[in-house]
Amino acid sequence: MPSYLGNSNRPIMSKSKNDKLQGTLTLLVLRTLAARGPLHGYGMCAHVHSISDDLLQVEEGSLYPALHRMEQDGWISSKWEITEKGRKAKVYAITARGRKQLADEEASWARLTRGVSRVLQYS
Amino acid sequence: MAWYRRLGNVFRTERVNDELDSEFQFHLAETADRFVAEGLNEEEARRRAGLLLGNYSVQKERTRDMDVAGWLDALRADLGYALRQAKANPGFAAIAVLSLALGIGANTAIFQLLDAIRLRGLPVKDPSQLATVERSKNFYTAGWYASRNEAFSYAQMKALERHQHAFSDILTFWPTRFNLSTGGQSRYAEALVVSSNFFDVLGVTPVAGSAVLAKDDKVVCSSATAVLSYSFWQREFGGEMSAIGKTISLDGHRFPIGGVMPRSFFGVEPGHGFDVAVPLCVDNVFSKDGKGRAFNETAFWLTPMGRLKPGWTVERASADVRNQSPAIFRETLPAEYRAEGVKSYLANKFKAASASAGVSSIRRGYENPLWILLAITGSVLLIACANLANLLLARASAREREMAVRQAVGASRPRLLLQLLSESLLLAVAGAALGFTLAQILSRALIAFLNTADTRVEVPLGVDWNVFGFLAGWAVITCILFGLAPALRASGGEPVAAMRGARTATASRQRNGLRRMLVISQVALSLVLLIAALLFSRSLQKLLATNLGFDSRNVLLATVTTKGAGMENTDRRRQLFRDLDSRAASLGNVVSAAPILFTPFSGSGWNNSVHADSDAARAGGKEAWFNRVGPKYFATMGTPILAGRDVNDHDDLKAPKVALVNRAFAKRFFGGKNPVGRSFRVEADEGKPDSVYQIAGLVGDTKYNEFSEEQRCIAFLPLAQDDDPGDDRNFVIRARGSLGAVQSAFQHEVNALNPNLLVDFRVLDVQIQNSVLRERLMSNLSVVFGILAACLSTLGLYGVISYMVARRRTEIGIRVALGATRSNVYTLVARDAAIMVAIGLLAGFAVALVLSQYAESLLFELKARDPLTLVLAGSLLTITAGIATMLPARRAARLEPTTALREE
């Protein structure tokens, strides 16, 4: 059973870094775009899904609001492209500001996991 | 995407929606493809893809929220809703917008005038550095005055320039008017006679030609050029560049035109524009003695304005000119002053005052009245707002269910509040916009009212930030005033209670508390306005009812000018004036005519110290006023000759000097005894013998220049005994029937004698009415607004009482069913109204008593707390309130209990 990221009952309005679930979605998106280059929403879902060996699944309902918010924040940019199948797709790419944000988020994620694993290990 | 794109997206709804659809459609299609690849059929694949994405429209909405500035989107939706509301209820919208427009329009019109004469800086470089120099308290000078502003002699201004340290440069100016025409009817140009540094100090550069007024900067200069205002250039020369270098005739003297000032530059006196400026070194060419007033120590005509040195404030400058005053006045002491005059003159002090908004006689006369009118129109606007608030409150109760439904399905209270307020804001902004248009008409009408034959009032009424801010401020304030309370009320109800449709048998007092407060404040405000209206109109009435001592009806005033008509010889002028007099008297439809030096209420005058023949003292005479008249003046004016004789043709230069005096003169100098045969002495300048006049007649008291003046002691001297007949002569012509016919007949006679003579006509009644222009303005406007206020608050009272009666139908029905009589019901309703009106009146009286002191100085023979006025205003309002209550009260009393109860 894959873990769902994001909380579909609540609109994603907050930019707070403390919202860990939210922060994780941002982190995954930025990381994916940084690694894979420009990608559309569906591609991101597929990528996360396959790379995590089906352990993680981006909840589609949370992905699009998050993408649009990140675009407002200037972390990613978008443009429309036609895919090989001849479909119109909105393709996102990471920006310079997005890369900075990614570095921040990676660091804070590392802190979090280190902390959590210590607690799990020693208590 | 930056914030402005979020704002922009609010207005690209379609586009944003389409893009979201495309993005989601792509996602669904790709997901479906995957399911198909996993072996599902097409339809099932699409269904599963949809399930995975979740509720499509919710997703879309949540994603869209990220792209769009929410508040703005909500506002757009609210305004759209408000517009639909206005369309659904056009009557209410029209009443709201119109009453706001009237209130805001009147208010803005007055504010625009105040802005133009008081608040706005002069259209010159750094107006905040400009300051003027004025008289301090107890300033004494005696001599010849010829300016609407505080004015000083040339010598005083030169001494000021030398002694002061505060200003880098000082300019001086004298506003006057010159005649442009060279024969026939005169045509005047408003002129500024200015120091040659005038335009340099102000830092204004010409749009055409140059602003150099005189080549050689001397007391008397040989060459001078005229500089035109933009509007005069357009008017007289059609804005042609060829005007530069042409000449212009001013009082018969020709000047080359040097340049044209920019359109925005109206001069330095808000309220008075200028057409043409000439340097004051040419004053000699206009003077009779050929020297000009620069050499006359007792000619007070120049107003100074200086540019403060960097770092100097007006206060510091004021201290400086004050400190330098003793030296300045010692240097400029006129030789002809007598001992007491010398003492007072040397004690004179200057002070400085800011001139960033220029100097203005209009401001001096009208600033306080305009502030009062602003307060009055503001109050009318408040009353209109109260009415709107009441209407909206009534609507709020009608919409309780609608609001309850909205809340029940999830609308938050702030959201509802915003929606209701945006409706008010729409009305307020529409009202302000229409009000602004109205203000443009009203303010021009006001200025037109202030314009007379003698004073051309020109106010540049541009829209600046002051006016815009004022308008926007009113729009927001009115919106909050009339919209907030009803919005709070409408959105604050408990959904359950409202949905149940509960209407209690007795409408609770608390729910109507706000309406009562509104009505009470309306009554209070309109009482204050009615008191103001009555005060100003009664004051004007008292002024106009003053006995002038002459009959002003059907009198034409004519002024004939010989300047530029080749009449330099005094004997020829004397002969001409005699001819004109007899020709005027023999015209058709003329009862009689006579010449006079100063026509009544012209604003000009001449006074001096006088001693009765019994008084031996050399100095310390009492003040009397003088005028010169020809034979039959008193008969023409209808002033009785009480004793002695009229001026006659034998009273010429060879005959002994005689005078006719009025009763006040006889009373003051001769203890009320018949003065005929006695004589009086008029103090002359130092070193000259006093003149002695034999009293030939006693005439009735007349007003000299104003309705409100204390009765002056006046001595009338024969015109023919004046050493200098002057350049021009005034005639009073009493006519039968149309003054216009007499005017053209006299014009014809004058030009038959000499085509180069200029004539000016005025109607005595108009001249007299113009002397109380300010009082008429205050009276007319305060009455209009007072009535408007009373009507509005009566309507408000009527509306609230009717509403309360409607709400209490059931209660009244039960009361009647239980045996209450019609008069019981009537009393029930009327008592309610009476209490509100009584509280309102009390509050109004209290406010009026506090505010009345500000009106005191504008009233004539009337205390601001005049009891009769207070009683009159109170009863007027009580009567109208009574009528407003009677109608709904009677309706309530006639209520059939069965119908009222059946409705429940």
Image (cartoon, rainbow, N blue to C red):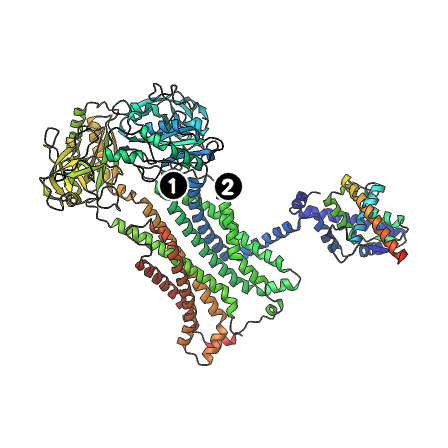
Q: Nearer the viewer, residue B43 or B714?
A: B714
Could you say which disc has been placed on residue B20 in the image? Answer: none
Give the total number of marks visible in the rendering. 2
Give the percent coordinates (x, y) of residue B380: 43, 54
Q: Considering only vertical position in the picture, is A79 above or below B406?
A: above
Q: Nearer the viewer, residue A40 or B576?
A: B576
Going from N to C along the chain, the mark reached first, 2 or 1, is 1
Q: Name which residue type carries label 2.
A: Trp
Q: Is residue B190 visible?
A: no
Reading the image, the residue beneath label 1 is B363
Give the percent coordinates (x, y) of residue B218: 36, 20
Reading the image, the residue beneath label 2 is B465
Residue drawn at the location 74% of the way across and 42% of the way down? A74
Q: Name which residue type carries label 1.
A: Arg
2 and 1 marks on the same chain: yes
Give the percent coordinates (x, y) of residue B544: 26, 49
Q: Quadrant of residue B641?
A: top left
Q: Which element type, helix, strand or loop, lies under badge 2?
A: helix
* Chain on which label 1 sits: B
On-image quarter of the C terminus of chain B: bottom right
